[in-house]
Image: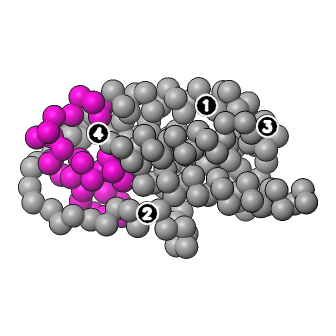
């Protein structure tokens, strides 16, 4: 669970004093704005909460290979988000964005804190890794956010280079 908290702290540090303009500005027409990255993270937390809550009940305990979930942090391999996790393009304030993130993360944290040690060994399907234990799934959520905090850093660099 540490990776989830550490990743969110990094994200919060990156955005803590952004202007609403910077938050909502795209580096190019094809790239996401920071707001869109955050909306994607928000949707990921919401989807993960529902997925863990509902699918864990019927999941089986079985042996699965430990997957290298940390590779999701590697931004040298572009990935397209699933349609249901594509961000909404909207212009909102930083405070609104933070509130949305906090609400979704609070729900996810409640779900995770209710998971027993035994449930952590249950196996769930995953689009990239095929099967992950619940513990690996939780780790994946954190590594996924690290990937997107790197994306936020890249966006900030691009936006700052346009100013200078």
From the image, tell me which residue sits under label 1. Answer: 98
- Quick one: SS at disc 1? helix
Seen from the viewer's position, the closer of residues 55 and 107 is 107
- Residue 58 percent across, percent down from the top left: 15, 40
Precedes in sequence: disc 4 or disc 2: 4
Residue 11 appears left or right of 68:
right
- Residue 151 percent across, percent down from the top left: 61, 58
Mark drawn on residue 42: none
Instruction: Point out the residue furthest to the right here.
Output: 164
Dot 2: few (<14), some (14–19), or many (≥20) neighbours within 10 Å?
Answer: many
Q: Give how far apart the Cα atoms at labels 2 and 3 are.
A: 29 Å
Q: Is residue 164 above or below residue 12?
A: below
Dot 3: few (<14), some (14–19), or many (≥20) neighbours within 10 Å?
Answer: few
Q: Residue at x 67, y 36 (%)?
A: 16
Residues in magenta, as a range? 111-140
Dot 4: few (<14), some (14–19), or many (≥20) neighbours within 10 Å?
Answer: some
Precedes in sequence: disc 3 or disc 1: 3
Q: Give how far apart the Cα atoms at labels 4 and 1 are.
A: 23 Å
Task: Point out the frontmost of discs 4 and 3.
Answer: 3
Mark drawn on residue 52: 4
Residue 132 appears left or right of 87:
left
From the image, tell me which residue sits under label 3. Answer: 19
């Amino acid at each position: 669970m540490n990776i989830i908290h550490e990743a969110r702290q990094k994200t919060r540090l990156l955005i803590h004093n952004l202007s609403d303009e910077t938050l909502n500005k795209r580096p190019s027409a094809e790239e996401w704005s920071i707001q869109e990255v955050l909306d994607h993270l928000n949707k990921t937390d919401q989807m993960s909460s529902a997925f863990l809550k509902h699918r864990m009940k019927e999941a089986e305990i079985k042996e699965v290979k430990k997957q290298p979930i940390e590779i999701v942090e590697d931004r040298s391999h572009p990935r397209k988000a699933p349609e249901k996790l594509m961000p909404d393009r909207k212009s909102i304030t930083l405070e609104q964005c933070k509130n949305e993130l906090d609400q979704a993360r609070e729900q996810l944290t409640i779900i995770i804190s209710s998971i027993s040690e035994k449930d952590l060994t249950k196996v769930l399907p995953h689009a990239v890794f095929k099967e992950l234990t619940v513990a690996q799934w939780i780790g994946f959520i954190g590594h996924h956010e690290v990937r997107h905090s790197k994306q936020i850093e890249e966006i900030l660099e691009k936006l700052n280079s346009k100013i200078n």
